[in-house]
Image (cartoon, rainbow, N blue to C red):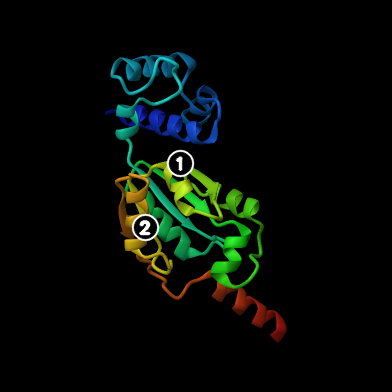
Amino acid sequence: MKQSEKAILSIMYVCQIEGKEVFEVIRKKTMFSEDLINSKIDELIKNQLVNNDRKTLTDIGRNSLCVVLAGGVFDIIHPGHIHTLNAAKKLGDVLVVVVATDNTAVKMKKRRPLHAQEQRQELVNSLSMVDLCLIGQEDDIFKTVNHVKPQIIALGYDQVHQEKFIIEGCKKIELDAKVARLQSPIPESSSSKIQKEYGESIHGI
């Protein structure tokens, strides 16, 4: 499959999740002409990768994409996050990131996040390697997993989720997904540590 066709399929997948109008997003992201976009979509329909509605993927089209799902609080974006998300993106074609809700963040970090969940979503969405950022579900993380249906779930080096828990949860929703534990070159880097050090430096002035 040509890279341009893979890009269009990836955009269609993201637009389906977000409920956005496909054609305008393709034109904005690819800079292709209207005629070129239409000819490529015609080809994708011919190859049974896109439905006749010209905006949704067939099962074959969806299965041709490798979607990677990663999650976290992402309260203060630091080099460890960037490395981890870059590594996650290299595992597939589309990287979907889920940011924890404010309430979930409190449970995980034992403190209120500096940035509200919508702000953290906007921050992560602005990162070049991220195709889509969603706000997670508080009661059941597998609701989001089932919505995204990733082939790979990428866990950061410091995330508390156990691979066994993720695998068993995926089995319950009948999703065949692999779990990848990503390493960080700066394991001592964390949002909590940065916040603590910043606070100490302010008090020391």
Say which amino acid is labelled 1: His
* Among numbered discs 1 and 2, the one appearing first in the sequence: 1
The amino acid type of the residue labelled 2 equals Ile
Quadrant (top left, top right, bottom left, bottom right) of the N terminus:
top left
Percent coordinates x, y for residue 192 in the rendering:
56, 73
Query: Within the image, what quadrant is residue 10 found in?
Result: top left
Q: Residues within 10 Å of mark 2 (few under 14, many from 20)?
A: some
> Which residue, given by chain and number where applicable, does mark 1 sit on?
147
Q: Residue at x 50, y 32 (%)?
A: 15
Q: Residue 111 placed where, x, y %?
A: 63, 71
Q: Position of residue 106 (x, y in %)?
A: 60, 67
41 over 71 or under it: above or below: above
Residue drawn at x 47%, y 35% as measured from the top left: 14
> Can the viewer see residue 90?
no
Classify residue 127 as left or right of residue 37: right
* Residue 113 versus residue 56 in the image, above or below: below
User: Depth check: 55 or 86 in front?
Assistant: 55
Q: Nearer the viewer, residue 10 or 113?
A: 113
Depth order, front residue of 20/128: 20
From the image, tell me which residue sits under label 2. 166
Across and down, in percent, residue 177 comes to 31, 48
- Is 163 positioned to the left or the right of 53 in the image? left
| Above or below, 163 relative to 89 | below
Q: Quadrant of the C terminus?
A: bottom right
Q: Quadrant of residue 48?
A: top left
Is residue 143 visible to us here? yes
Few, some or many C-alpha atoms within 10 Å of disc 1 (few <14, some 14-19, many ≥20)? few
Secondary structure beneath label 2: helix
